[in-house]
Image (cartoon, rainbow, N blue to C red):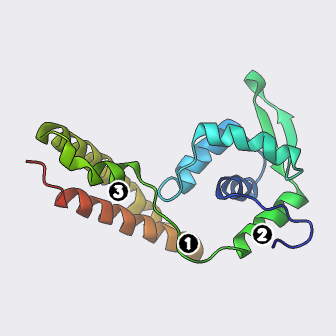
Amino acid sequence: MPPAGATPVNATAAALLGLLHSGPRTGGELVADAGERLGSFFAVTRSQVYRELPVLAEGGLLRLGKQGPRASQQYAITAAGKRSFKAWLGAGGGADAVRSPLVLRLLHAGTMTATERAELVATSRGAYAARLERARAAAKGEPDPYRKAVADFAVAHTRAMLKLLDAVPTA
């Protein structure tokens, strides 16, 4: 049960509230920040962001900020939003599920042709190799111990995905 004054939020809402701790952002900026800061371990889509922002604002967890160019709207976290985010942080623990469309595809790769399987593995391997380079660079330069731990996880997870791809028979 959340503390008094804290509205329960889902993980997507918590991700946005966490990003807004560093200052007001537009929806587009939040999409970009989420991809950059959370993308290696928590996917947030554009549609999720734009669906969640009005709900958070209506609930008093965000307030509207400056109107930007092309009708973009800034959002800022409120004191209630900070309480709800803190309550969400404190309610964590336990194991969570991995939700990977690639892993799901690989699970069913036996129903694909050898050519389709080889293309899936090659394309995915290239994407994960590039992600590994970015993850290593982020981990190497991260001074914050909590962000460093997450950055190291991103490296280990990416290596594990590459190992999985290498284990998939393509012939």
N-terminal-most mark, 1 or 3:
3
The residue lying toward the viewer, choosing from 94 and 136, is 94
SS label for mark 1: loop
Residue 33 percent coordinates (x, y): 61, 48
Residue 69, above or below 20:
above
Using the image as rendered, state which of residue 39 and residue 136 is in the foreground: 39
Where is mark 3, residue-wise? 133
Crowd tier of the residue under label 3, counting other residues whose Cα lies within 10 Å: few below 14, some 14–19, many 20 or above:
few
Splitting the image into 4 quarters, where does residue 22 fall? bottom right
Residue 56 at x, y = what percent? 80, 48
Residue 64 place in picture, x, y as percent: 87, 40
Residue named by callout 1: 143
Q: CA distance from mark 3 to mark 2?
A: 33 Å
> Residue 74, can we see it?
yes
75, above or below 99, in the image: above
Tell me: 25 left or right of 170: right
Q: CA distance from mark 2 to mark 1?
A: 23 Å
Q: Residue lying at the far top in this picture: please name it.
A: 70
Residue type at mark 1 is Pro
Q: Which mark is residue 122?
A: none
Q: Earlier in the sequence, mark 2 or mark 1?
A: 2
Closer to viewer: mark 3 or mark 2: 2
Above or below 28: residue 22: below
Q: In the image, is 170 to the left or to the right of 152?
A: left
* Nearer to us: label 2 or label 1: 2
The one nearer the camera, 64 or 135, is: 64
Of badges 1 and 3, nearer the viewer stands 3
Q: Residue at 92% of width from left, 66% of height from top?
A: 5
Which part of the image, by quadrant, shows the N terminus?
A: bottom right
The residue under label 2 is 86
Within 10 Å of the Cα at label 2, are there few (<14), some (14-19), or many (20+) other Cα atoms? some
